Every structure is written in C-alpha cells, then in structure tokens.
C-alpha cells in the first residue's frame, strides 16, 4: 500500500463530518461539526487520522474536550508537530483530571505556551517539580507544608502556592532550582515570623496598600535571605546567584535587615520611607506576594487547633495522675527553645504523645515561645479523650479518603493521577452462629483439609553430614572412625545443622462484594472463606482477607475482614458471616490497595488471590469493558513488579477471554458451578503454594 | 583437653564517648547491682560505642555478638568439635563471657532466632545461671558478668518485636541522636574536621531526620555524619563527602536522592 493509493487519499469533508459525528455526538453543545470537518479537510490523511484518534480519546473523557481538540487541531499540528500534538492532548486531559473542565480548556487553548514549553524546555512546570519541592520543604521544616499551584508565589502559612510555570531563567534546570529557592523563601516567611506582626494594621495608614505589600515582600525577602544564608549557606549562595544583584534602591536597608536580630517589625518600619522615596517596587519573581489577611486567618486557626491538641494532651496526663494517692496531680512544664516540652507529673518525667509534641513545636514556630495559657491543661468540662474523629459506621462520600490511587487509562496509555479514592472499613459483624453452622455441615471435609495441610507445614529440618553445624552427626563420626582405622581418608563432614524450612508465605484474599454476588454466590464465597481459614490455620501461613466494592472512582470501598497478623477468632468469624453483596467491581484500585498491604509483609513469597464472579465493572460505562480490564491488568503487573503473584478464582463462564488478558493463561481457575468453590478453594491454594 | 574457651582481654584504650545524659551513672548502678541492661535507639546513635566505653570504664572484657536471623543457641553457647578421635567442647561467645566475668553485648537482639531468648532468660533474672544442656553444665555467672542487649524500635515490624517476658528483665535505657551542639562536638572529635563543617554536617543530619517516614526509613545517624567528616578530613570537599557518605548511603530511590542532593546543596 502506498501513500498515494486509494485507501490513503485524504478524507473529504462529508466523510470527516460523519466520523466526527460518531466521535462527538454526545457533545452537549450540539454544535455542528461541519465547520470542524472543513478545517480538517486540507490536512494529509495521516494527520487527519491522528486528529480523529485523539479526538476519540479525549471525547471518551469528556465530549466537550474532544470537540475542543478537533477545533484547535490544525493550529496545534502546525505549531507542535505530530508528536507534540499527542502530548498537547494528554496535557489537557491531565489538567481535566486534576482541575476540571475549565482549566483543561484553557490549557488546550494556550497552544503557544505549550509550544514554548516544549521547544525551549526552558521553563519548569509546577507539576514536574511538585514532589521535589515538597520533600525539600519537608526536610527544611519538619512541619508539613502543603504545596499548590497558584497565580503567584505566596503562602498562607499552611500551604505554599507556587506559579504553574516558571520561565524566568534561561535553562529549565535553573528554573527548577528557582522553584526550590522560591519555596524556601516562603517557608522562611513562616519559619522566621513574617506574619507574627499584624501587617494589616501596620499598613492601614500607608497610602497605597498594594504597593506597600509589594515593598514589604521585597524587604522581607532581603531579611529572610540573610537568615537562610546564615543557617543554610549553600542555599543562600544559590538564592543570591538566581536572583542576581539586589536593586540599588535597597542598599540603605540591607545592613539593617541583614542582622540576625532583625524581625518583620524592621521591615515594616522601613516601609514608609521606601513608599515615599522610591516609586514602584522592583519586580522580582521569586519574591512572591503577601496576603497578610489570609495568612493571619490560617495562622490563627492553626494556633487555636494546636492549642487544643496540646492542652488536651496535658489534661489527659493530669487526669492520668501521678504518684500521689489523693488530690490533683501537679503538672510541671518546662519548654525548651525548639518547642520540645519537658513535662513532669508530680515530679516524674512523662512523655507527651507525638501529636502534642508536634503541636508544641508548631506553636513555637508561630508564636516564638509557648505562652502560659497554652500550657494550662484544658478544664474538665471541655476535655474530650481525643479530638480525632473516627470513621462513622455509615459510608459517606464526604469523608476524607484513606488513600488515593492512580488508574490506568488505556486510551491515553497513561495514568490518571490520584484518580480513585479508597475508604477502608471493617465489615459489619454478621451472625457468628453462621460459621459454626457451616463448620458442622462441612465437618468431615474440614477435618480432611486440616490433615492434608498439616502435612505440608514447614518445620525445621536437620541436615546431616555437614562440614560444620551445631551438633555432631554420630553416623558420620562412626563412619569416619571406621575409615580412619581402615586407612581410608575420613570425610570431614561430621556435623549436622538445623535449617529452617519456613514457608515464608503471605496470602491476600480479595473477595468480590459487588451487587452481582448477591444470593448463592455470596454464600459460596463465605463458605469458601471458612474452609480457607481452617486450612490456613493448620498451615500457619500469614494471610489476610479483604472485600471490595464501590460506586464510582470517588468511593472505592475496601472492607477489612481479617488483617495480616490478626487471629482467626470470633470477631473474624462474625465478619466473614457479615460479608454481603454491595455495589460495583472496580478491581484495579482494590488490587493496588491490597498489593500495598501485601507488599509490606516481610516474607519471601506473596500471593494475591481474587475470588470473583465476573469482569471488572463500575457505575457508569467508563470502567465497563476494555477500560476496566486494561486497568486491572496494569494493576496486576504493578503487583508482579513488587514480587507478588496473582491468581483468580472465578465462576464467570465467559471468564477465559478476559482473564487470560488480565492474569495470564496459567493464573486463573474457572469453576463451572458455584457450589464447588468451598470444596475446591483449599486445594487450589495448596497447589499454588506447594514448594 | 576437653574444653576450649577463648581468652578475653579487657578494653585497653579509652574509647571516645561523649555522654549525653546520665547514662554512664545509670549503667554503673546497674552493673553494681548485677542487673542486665537493654539499650534502645536508632541505628548509629552510639549504643555500641557506649558499651565499649563502659567496658573500659568498668575494666571488664567485652564480648560483642551481632545477632542475625540464623543465630542459634549453639552459636551463643558453643559446640562440640572433633579433634582426632576426641570431642572437644568449644565455648561460644556467651559462655566465654560468663566464664570470664565479661560484659556480653548482644547487638540487635530482635534479629536472632526466637529460641535464643531461652538461654538469655535465666541469665537475666535473679538466677544468673547459664544452662549448657549439651554438656549438662549449669554455669553460675560471676558478679562481674553483665548482659547487655540492644534493639532499634524504629523497625516497625510485628515479627521483629521484643517479647515482654524478655524486655521486663532489663533495665532499659533510651538513646537518641544527641542535641546539635553535642553532636557537632562528636563530629569534630571523631571526624577530625573543624567546628564550622561539623555544624553544617549536623544541620544536614537534622534536615534528613525531618524526612523520616516521608520516604526515608531513618534520617542520617551520627555515625554517618562522622563518616562524612572523616572523608572531608581525608581531603575531599564537604559536598562530595556529604553526597557519598550521607545522601547515597541513605537511599536508592531516585526522587529521594534528588531531594537529599538538594539539601546537601542547601547546607554547603
């Protein structure tokens, strides 16, 4: 086939229109695609196909984005080339995942910026340095500071906002270092008390608030850089190099602000002069902006919150009492300069809980020292055992997710970052009698399973005839003696050594709790788990059981039935009884979460077994079909990379077509009858873990 | 000749040790009352050096056993060897220490196999005897014998926890990295660098400790800081030394390595 052949001729407008209609028909705007088709017509066929493919990918995420991609395609192709075009679409989709529709559209529209970014690669983007900056700031401060992208660089003392993109310097690497320096300067604002003074009050008398704040930011930058240079000389040198020389008009203030004893008050007192004698402040990018109102509010909230944490902890210590038998315990508190508190109850040194220590340290950073009212225990009326809220028994979407996981989008061949929200909770206990009843019903089978598994159990073995070991091997010694007497050369291997024949195995059972398991599948699952527990108890392997279900990506529920290291006791049994059919089967995220738990086990062999009744599925059609299968496959591959073997036991007779793709040909079993699950499962496990 | 026991010598030269609190006095009190001691603390904060120093101070021989997960009771107690046609008993380090009235230091005790604790228990309470069942020997410990064990509570693993029945036989002393001033003094003394570089290294140590649990299992230990200082005193630049002896020693993760490099650059 040549490029000039009939199948590679350009598509005509009506053909394009038809294809676009198929791809974008879901577009809510009902805009005609005729105009789009006309714009695509002059493009060569390869490019036409490229646009159609990516428009399809984008439309799967959001039809409106697909429309936008086609509309901008000719210009984007011209500016970015074929490869850049794909990257441009992906960047837009990424932005949609993280920030929503409007920013995504803006990002797509701004092709010039994207092109500049790609061609020069001189600029650095917030997303690429986010992790690096976050770890850097964590290293500097100890107090966690969140990072966010913002219009300018500023901090509210809890979060550091940094611009989306920095292109101040010529090289991308320099711009990345500029990000670090900027973040360090903002960290220094919180560390060296820029907001310890009431800035708003101080500048009300000044004529131009905006300009005053700009000048103050510059003056503070001078002061803070001097402090940083003092404590972190390397960073000081780097900051100086990145910013270049300070503007001349600052000369008069440098000496005063450079002293170690200078505070924000010094900067404030210099303000009127600067406002009067120098017009517009120098535009220094990395200096950022100040928002004292927001910072003050956040700071006040944090101080209030941490005061409560600290006072509650002190009240708890006081309530716990000291050595004296009667009367109130006497609290004696000495605070060190770095916020480390030494607390004595009735003269005995006691340790504060880590959260209270952290609160104290944070308060010292905010207030300079711990004021006495912070150090008085909360009164008896106001004190609660803890101010942490445990997860309620009901599942709500407004809870904070336990963790977030990326999800694989095969359309894009890329991950959607932090896409799935996982909530872990315990299964509500069911009727514990159920387990006993099943135990009685399968009494003979359980006995059989136990015997068979006990035989497999790993035990210490004694290796004879070893060159060294803790004991003498008498047989070997007798042989050696005979050899010596008869003139033969005796073997030097005269000892026996005990070696551990440990199974060193951890198994994670992942149980499908989707709505489709309702009824006998659910019964079979529960019975199978009871058999398994009996078998595994006999074997002594480390194992855990978790159920999974969910309703869209923002509510992926993981139900704990038995954690690793937990004993197979009454509580676990009643949780097995309590397993019930719930919502949907978003498998990838469940695998990722359970893989994380499993990977942390200190054993040699790790096995993830899924009990399921069908293919991955979730509410809405996004996860159904290929998307879900590809994501699950990706999650299983991630698990494999962490040394985890996966296996699936299913009763879906259509399983083989997709299971082979997900698990590989030898790693699943399809049972043709649900009733066989309890009988088979223990055997399957034994075969999998045979050594 | 049916018994071989290694000759133990006392610690001859005073090891460098910088006390951080009242640990020396506490240890002496435990030694005087013949009580065993448990040292806990992160890696490289000076536990082993402290025991060496105390052995020197108390003028007793020191036997150190680094425990590992295949350490058996025979490795501690001893075993029969065959020499010619004879069997000869060879004392293990613990038995030798008991016979000589030495300090026996079992480093990272949680790593050892569980059955080893059985031989420690009767030594660590008022009985103070060592049972060597293979020889049918009940060896009473002389007054000078002292058992010291250590472990690092930082490794949070249920398999690597010390049982209450074991830990409740010991006088426990907690170690941590020294305060910055003190740590700098240690780095100067041990690493042979000037106070300015020592303070910078200590600062870097602090910064890495802020990252503990955020991608690093442990921050830089005092030992690592001393290593870096020694590299500097051997003629390398501080940045080079800190990168090799601290940043690279702490992690293999590329992201974390970058962060540590950033921090090294920030300090020097």
Image: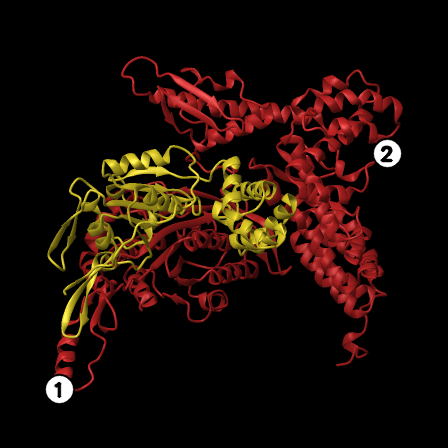
Chain colours: A red, B yellow
Residue drawn at the location 41% of the way across and 20% of the way down: A315
Q: Are marks 1 and 2 in contact (CB under 8 Å)?
A: no
* Residue B252, x across and y down, in percent: 53, 56
Name the residue rendered at 39%, 60% in the picture: A606
Image quadrant where one finds the N terminus of chain B? bottom left
Mark sitting on residue A239: none
Q: Where on the picture, by quarter, is residue A429? A: top left
Give the spatial CA distance, label 1 vs label 2.
Answer: 102 Å
Which percent across, then down, holds residue B249? 52, 54
Please, which residue is most extreme toward the front here?
Answer: B12
Protein chain holding label 1:
A
User: Which numbered circle lies on residue A248?
Assistant: 2
Outermost residue to the bottom:
A487
x then y, percent, for residue B185: 51, 39
A512 relative to A242, above or below = below
Front position among marks 1 and 2: 1
Residue A106, how many percent across, how many down? 76, 46
Quadrant where the C terminus of chain B sits is: top right
Look at the numbered disc 1 and give the secondary structure of its residue: loop
Write down the residue under mark 1. Answer: A486
Q: Residues within 10 Å of mark 1 (few under 14, many from 20)?
A: few
Position of A621 with respect to B160 (left or right) is right
Q: Nearer the viewer, residue A356 or B48?
A: B48
Q: Nearer the viewer, residue A471 or A509?
A: A471
A116 with respect to A159 (left or right): right
Where residue A413 sits, quadrant-wise, is bottom right
Label tally: 2
The answer to which of marks 1 and 2 sits earlier in the sequence is: 2
């Amino acid at each position: 086939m040549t490029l000039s052949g009939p199948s590679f001729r350009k598509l005509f407008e009506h053909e394009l229109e038809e294809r676009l209609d198929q791809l974008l028909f879901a577009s809510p705007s009902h805009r005609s695609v005729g105009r789009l088709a006309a714009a695509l017509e002059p493009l060569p066929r390869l490019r036409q196909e490229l646009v159609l493919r990516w428009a399809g990918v984008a439309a799967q995420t959001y039809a409106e984005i697909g429309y936008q991609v086609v509309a901008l395609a000719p210009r984007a192709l011209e500016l970015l080339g074929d490869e850049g075009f794909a990257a441009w679409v992906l960047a837009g989709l990424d932005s949609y995942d993280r920030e929503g529709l409007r920013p995504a559209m803006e990002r797509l529209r701004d092709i010039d910026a994207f092109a500049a970014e790609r061609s020069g690669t001189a600029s650095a983007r917030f997303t690429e340095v986010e992790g690096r900056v976050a770890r850097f700031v964590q290293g500097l401060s100890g107090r966690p500071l969140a990072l966010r992208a913002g219009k300018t660089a500023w901090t509210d003392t809890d979060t550091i906002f940094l611009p989306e993109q920095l292109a101040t310097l010529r090289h991308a690497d320099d711009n990345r270092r500029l990000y670090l320096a900027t973040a360090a300067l903002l960290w220094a604002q919180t560390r060296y008390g820029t907001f310890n003074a009431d800035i708003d009050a101080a500048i009300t008398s000044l004529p131009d608030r905006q300009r005053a704040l700009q000048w103050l930011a510059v003056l503070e930058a001078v002061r803070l850089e001097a402090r940083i240079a003092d404590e972190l000389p390397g960073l000081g040198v780097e900051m100086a190099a990145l910013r270049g020389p300070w503007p001349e008009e600052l000369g008069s203030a440098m000496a005063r602000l450079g002293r170690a004893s200078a505070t924000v008050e010094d900067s404030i007192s210099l303000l009127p002069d600067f406002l009067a004698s120098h017009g517009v402040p120098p535009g220094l990018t990395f200096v950022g902006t100040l928002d004292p109102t927001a910072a003050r509010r956040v700071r006040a909230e944090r101080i209030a919150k941490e005061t409560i944490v600290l006072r509650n902890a002190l009240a708890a210590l006081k309530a716990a009492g000291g050595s004296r038998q009667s009367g109130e315990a006497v609290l004696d508190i000495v605070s060190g300069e770095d916020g480390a508190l030494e607390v004595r109850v009735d003269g005995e040194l006691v340790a504060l809980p880590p959260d209270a220590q952290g609160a104290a340290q944070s308060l010292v950073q905010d207030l300079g020292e711990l004021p006495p009212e912070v150090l008085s225990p909360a009164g008896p009326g106001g004190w609660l055992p803890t101010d942490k809220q445990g997860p309620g028994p009901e599942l709500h979407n407004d809870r904070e997710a336990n963790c977030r996981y990326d999800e694989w989008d095969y359309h894009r061949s890329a991950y959607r970052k932090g896409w799935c929200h996982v909530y872990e909770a315990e299964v509500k206990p069911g009727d514990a009698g159920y387990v006993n009843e099943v135990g009685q019903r399968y009494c003979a089978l359980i006995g059989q399973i136990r015997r068979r598994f006990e035989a497999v159990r790993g035990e210490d073995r004694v290796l004879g005839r070893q060159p060294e070991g803790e004991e003498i091997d008498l047989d070997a010694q007798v042989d050696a003696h005979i050899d010596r007497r008869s003139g033969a050369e005796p073997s030097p291997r005269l000892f026996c050594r005990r070696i551990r024949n440990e199974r060193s195995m951890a198994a994670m059972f992942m149980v499908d709790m989707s709505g489709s398991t309702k009824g006998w599948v659910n019964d079979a699952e529960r019975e199978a788990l009871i058999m398994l527990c009996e078998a595994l108890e006999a074997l002594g392997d480390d194992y855990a059981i978790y159920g999974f279900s969910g309703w869209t990506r923002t509510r992926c529920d993981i139900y704990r039935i038995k954690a690793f290291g937990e004993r197979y006791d009454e509580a676990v049994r009643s949780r097995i009884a309590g397993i019930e059919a719930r919502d949907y089967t978003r498998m990838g995220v469940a695998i990722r979460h359970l893989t994380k738990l499993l990977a942390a086990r200190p054993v040699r062999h790790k096995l993830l077994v899924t009990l399921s009744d069908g293919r991955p599925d979730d509410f809405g059609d996004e996860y159904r079909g290929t998307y879900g299968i590809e994501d699950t496959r990706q999650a299983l591959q991630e698990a494999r990379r962490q040394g985890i073997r996966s296996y699936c036991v299913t009763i879906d007779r259509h399983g083989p077509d997709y299971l082979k793709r997900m698990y590989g040909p030898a790693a699943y079993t399809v049972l043709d009858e649900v009733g066989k699950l309890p009988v088979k499962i223990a055997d399957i496990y034994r075969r999998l873990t045979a050594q | 000749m049916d018994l071989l026991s290694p000759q133990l010598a006392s610690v001859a030269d005073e090891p460098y040790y910088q006390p951080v609190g009242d640990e020396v006095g506490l240890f002496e009190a435990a030694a005087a009352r013949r009580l065993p001691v448990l040292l806990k603390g992160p890696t490289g904060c000076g536990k082993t050096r402290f025991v060496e120093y105390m052995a020197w101070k108390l003028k007793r021989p020191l036997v150190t056993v680094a425990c590992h997960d295949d350490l058996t009771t025979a490795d501690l107690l001893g075993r029969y060897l065959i020499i010619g046609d004879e069997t000869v008993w060879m004392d293990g380090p613990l038995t030798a220490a008991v016979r000589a009235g030495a300090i026996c230091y079992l480093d990272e005790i949680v790593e050892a196999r569980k059955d080893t604790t059985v031989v420690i228990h009767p030594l660590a309470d008022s009985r103070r005897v060592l049972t060597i069942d293979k020889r049918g020997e009940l060896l009473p410990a002389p007054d000078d014998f002292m058992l010291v064990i250590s472990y690092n509570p930082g490794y949070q693993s249920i398999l690597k926890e010390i049982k209450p029945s074991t830990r409740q036989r010991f006088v426990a002393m907690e170690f941590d990295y020294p305060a910055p001033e003190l740590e700098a003094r240690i780095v100067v003394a041990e690493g042979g660098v000037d106070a300015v570089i020592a303070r910078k290294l200590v600062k870097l140590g602090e910064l890495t400790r802020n990252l503990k649990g955020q991608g690093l299992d442990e921050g830089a230990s005092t030992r690592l800081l001393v290593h870096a200082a020694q590299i500097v005193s051997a003629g390398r630049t501080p940045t080079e030394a800190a990168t090799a002896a601290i940043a690279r020693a702490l992690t293999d993760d590329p992201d974390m390595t970058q962060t540590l490099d950033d921090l090294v650059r920030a300090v020097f």
